[in-house]
Image (cartoon, coloured by chain):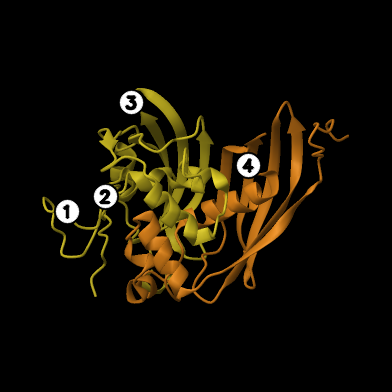
Chain colours: A orange, B yellow
Amino acid sequence: MPDAPLSQGIVVGATIDRVELEITYRRMIINVAGSWDFYAGHHDRDYARQQGHPDVFANTSLFLSFADRVITDWSGPGTRIARRKLTMRLPVHPGDTIYGEGEVTRVRDGRVDVQLTIGCDRGDCAYVEATIEL
Amino acid sequence: MPPQVDLPVGTYEEALKMIGTTTPVRTSSGAVNHAMIKLFCCTSEDANPSYWDEEAPISPPSMLIHWLLPPPWEPARPTDGRTAPEVLRTSVPLPGTAMVNVSVDHEYIRNVRVGERLSMVEELVAVSPEKQSHLGPGHYLTTKTTFFVGEETVAIETGVLFRFIPRDDA
């Protein structure tokens, strides 16, 4: 039985709209520079290959920031991410286009739980569970 | 070419001895600022006005750890263009020569605002026995990172990463 809807009309099962993001080399450079994350696997293809990857791979914060964007694009800027768990499944590389989409799983006392899937053509890349304060 | 982050090679037993180890308090090299927030938001093209507001922007929650990373070069610590952030999660001796993040769970207690200066302490919570994965054999490391401003805890992160021997080398 779904929880009672809040005044905002959010109910369990409500869809969190799909957002897409193209992973280009330019975006990888912005990712590295914007996060001060100069771990070689994020910018050095030779090093990434040495580590078993086909190419440089996005850092975890790209997934976290993308998940937050998907959520707050839907919930609005006045809402706050109170908790977020992200489980990695597949690294993403230049040439991938990732998407995020999900649904509301619980509604209670000004808080909403959501779950998201972040994926690309190769499969699911990450799973996210988050709690939003309204 | 040589790796740019040298993960310390050691045994599982050596890693177990480090459980409970905490790092010294590390403080960000500068205060939370709007210019860095804007660039960070460009990666995911996040137009959330909370981050772009010129009067009272907040740090994106996913950016917290990045306020604590060292610049890739410093006068006092020239690195010849290489960088090896001194974080506990990359300081544990294990057989694995590569690593990948598995999961990260954040509790955000309050927003972090421009002008605040973040500190953090990291603790090694657990090291798993050897496990097999599609990447190769390795160990799961669990760390807990506490972020604070002054004496106030603002966020807690529980991270799990996998330290492995890449399959081609296994």
Q: Amino acid at mark 4?
A: Ala
* Disc 1: host chain: B
Residue mark closest to the camera, 1 vs 4: 1
- Circle 3 chain: B
Between circles 3 and 4, the one closer to the viewer is 3
Dot 2 amino acid type: Pro
Residue B38: percent from left, percent from top? 44, 53
The numbered disc on residue A61 is none
Other-residue count near label 2 (Cα within 10 Å), few / some / many at <14 / 14–19 / ≥20: some
Asked if marks 1 and 2 touch (Cβ < 8 Å), the reply is: yes
- Name the residue tied to disc 1: B74
Q: Which residue, given by chain and number where applicable, does mark 2 sit on?
A: B70
Q: Residue furthest right?
A: A1
What residue sits 44% from the left and 72% below the top? A26
Q: Is residue A34 above or below residue A104?
A: below
Q: Which residue is mark 4?
A: A130
- Count residues near mark 4 (Cα–Cα under 10 Å), then give few for <14, some for 14-19, many for 20+: many
**x 42%, y 43%: residue:** B64
- Local SS, label 4: strand
In this rendering, would A30 be left or right of A83? left
Q: Quadrant of the N terminus of chain B?
A: bottom left
Q: Which residue is mark 3?
A: B150
In this view, B42 is above or below B122: below
Q: Cα distance, mark 4 to mark 2?
A: 29 Å
The residues tagged by marks 1 and 4 sit, at their Cα atoms, a distance apart of: 37 Å
Q: Decide: marks 3, 4 in contact (CB < 8 A)? A: no
Task: Report the chain holding disc 2.
Answer: B
